Image (cartoon, grey):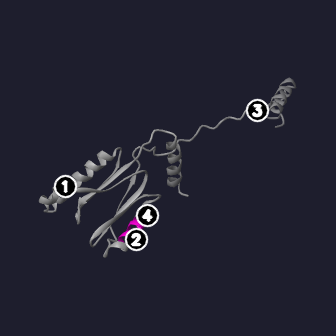
Amino acid sequence: MSKTFKSLVWVSVLLAFSEPTFAFTSMSAVPGDNSTLYRASNFDTQAAADKAALTGCRTAARSGGHGKTAKKCAVLSRSRGPGYGALVCGDGGCTWRLGYESAQAAVDAAYEGCGANYKNCQQTNIDSWLDTAGFPSEVEAQPQVQQQPSMSDIYRARWCAQQNVPPSQCGQ
């Protein structure tokens, strides 16, 4: 297992016993118009992700000469949780995958999904990202508990001290 995946597993376990937090992603577009598709990821709230996705879609529509359709932008998909995501478009639509252990795994899954549903899927410049908002970047190491000496260790240390034997020469 990779370090990133192990971190995600530990984060999930730790968060199961704490206040729920998520990294939110939204996909927005004018339905049927891939040129307006916009992804907003790694937000602390779903509302913030939705707002950013809709704003991005409207900007893409206006800059692409589709100003009148900008008001038709709609959130097509929402997700929450940590992990890598990817977006691949082909003739007639796009496919995205979220929550993967690595960027390559997300890209591969999105590409396979696109190929199963659309023709001429893009093979280069595939959009991928990592959602981590609301999650610690690294799992904090737990302090090691010091083991208490056994009674045998205590008696040995006392005997060595009474005999003036240095600790380094006193048997372990």
**Location of mark 1 (residue):** 58
N-term mark: 2 or 1: 1
Mark 2 in CB contact with mark 1 (< 8 angstroms):
no
Q: For this rendering, which residue is in front, 107 or 113?
A: 113
On-image quarter of the N terminus: bottom right
User: Mark 1: which amino acid?
Assistant: Arg
In the rendered image, is residue 125 in sight?
no
In the image, the segment drawn in magenta is 107-114
Q: CA distance from mark 3 to mark 1?
A: 68 Å
The secondary structure type at the circle numbered 1 is: helix
Left or right: where 59 falls relative to 89:
left
Q: Where does residue 54 sit, x and y in percent of width and height?
A: 23, 52
**Location of mark 2 (residue):** 112
Image height check: is 122 above or below 152?
below
Q: For this rendering, which residue is in front, 46 or 43?
A: 46
User: Mark 3: which amino acid?
Assistant: Pro
The crowding category of the residue bearing disc 1, from other C-alpha atoms within 10 Å (few below 14, some 14 to 19, many at least 20), is many
Q: CA distance from mark 2 to mark 1?
A: 28 Å
N-term mark: 2 or 4: 4
N-term mark: 3 or 1: 1
Left or right: where 171 falls relative to 29:
right
**Location of mark 4 (residue):** 104
- What residue is shown at x 25% (from left), y 48% (from top)? 51
User: Mark 2: which amino acid?
Assistant: Glu
- Asked if the stretch drawn in magenta spans residue 110, the answer is yes
- What residue is shown at x 41% (from left), y 48% (from top)? 132
N-term mark: 4 or 3: 4
Q: CA distance from mark 4 to mark 3?
A: 49 Å
User: Mark 4: which amino acid?
Assistant: Gln
The crowding category of the residue bearing disc 4, from other C-alpha atoms within 10 Å (few below 14, some 14 to 19, many at least 20), is some
**Location of mark 3 (residue):** 149
